[in-house]
Image (cartoon, rainbow, N blue to C red):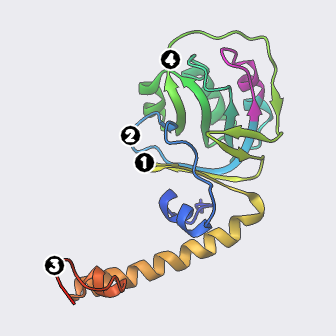
Amino acid sequence: MIDPARGHSTATLLEASGADIALHRDLQAAWPGARLCGPAFTVQGAGGDNLALHHAVVAAPAGHVLVVDVGGAAFGHWGEILTVAAQTSGLTGLLIDGGVRDRIELERLGFPVFSRNDAIGGTRKDFAGVLGGPIRVGGVSVRTGDLVVGDADGIVAIASEDIEMVLDAADARVEKEQDIIAQLRAGRTTVDLYAFGKQAGERG
């Protein structure tokens, strides 16, 4: 399967974009080493209610990442059961501005989840949610079809119309950095390569 982010880190994608596409740092991987990458399928839910997530697992196209706004609420909106359902439906991950539970099971299943908090409290099943519409997660607007990428450093959301531009810029950035690394190994310095001027301690 081709990585839709071409394997780039979130830091590289953020710098290549030149835009404010990084989600709030409080949104973190539910288990070490999780990497989220794919087109978003957006879900507007309600805090303490996970009926919208059950409907989203059925409605979202395979290969998509569920991106969910539940207002940061500390409830167990997602766990092992929904993970198995999502994997069976071909979904590739979850980004939720709210709480999840069953982190050990999520890691065992290898399903990437990024959330604001962990919580074991149960949820209602009253609000069916709004699926596929624009939402705001971690301080960033996300629409269905936008590219979301998460790794150990953070999460970015790239607008669908900017994806190719950002990925091309990221490719160029990585190529330039590889050249710099090669020159450093050959004995050059960062002060020299980046033209930072006189080294510390030197006087004119």
Residue type for callout 1:
Ala
Residue toward you, 194 or 94: 194
The nearer-to-camera label among 2 and 4 is 4
- Point out the tag, 2 or 4, that comes first from the N-terminus: 2
Residue at the spot 77% in from the left edge and 47% down from the top edge? 143
Q: Is label 1 in contact with label 2 (beta carbons under 8 Å)?
A: yes
The nearer-to-camera label among 3 and 1 is 3
For the N terminus, the quadrant is: bottom right
For numbered disc 1, what is the local secondary structure? loop
Residue type for callout 3:
Gly
- Point out the tag, 3 or 4, that comes first from the N-terminus: 4
- Point out the tag, 4 or 1, that comes first from the N-terminus: 4
Whether residue 5 is visible here, answered yes or no, is yes
Residue at the spot 38% in from the left edge and 40% down from the top edge? 32
- Residue 137, quarter of the rendered image: top right
Q: Is residue 130 left or right of residue 106?
A: right
Marks 3 and 1 sit apart, C-alpha to C-alpha, by 36 Å
Which region is colored magenta?
43-55
- Give the numbered dot on residue 201: 3
Residue that badge 2 annotates: 32
- Give the numbered dot on residue 120: none
- Point out the tag, 3 or 1, that comes first from the N-terminus: 1
Marks 1 and 2 sit apart, C-alpha to C-alpha, by 8 Å
The nearer-to-camera label among 3 and 4 is 3
For numbered disc 4, what is the local secondary structure? loop
- Give the numbered dot on residue 119: 4
The nearer-to-camera label among 2 and 3 is 3
Residue toward you, 190 or 82: 190
Q: Position of residue 2 (x, y in %)?
A: 60, 63
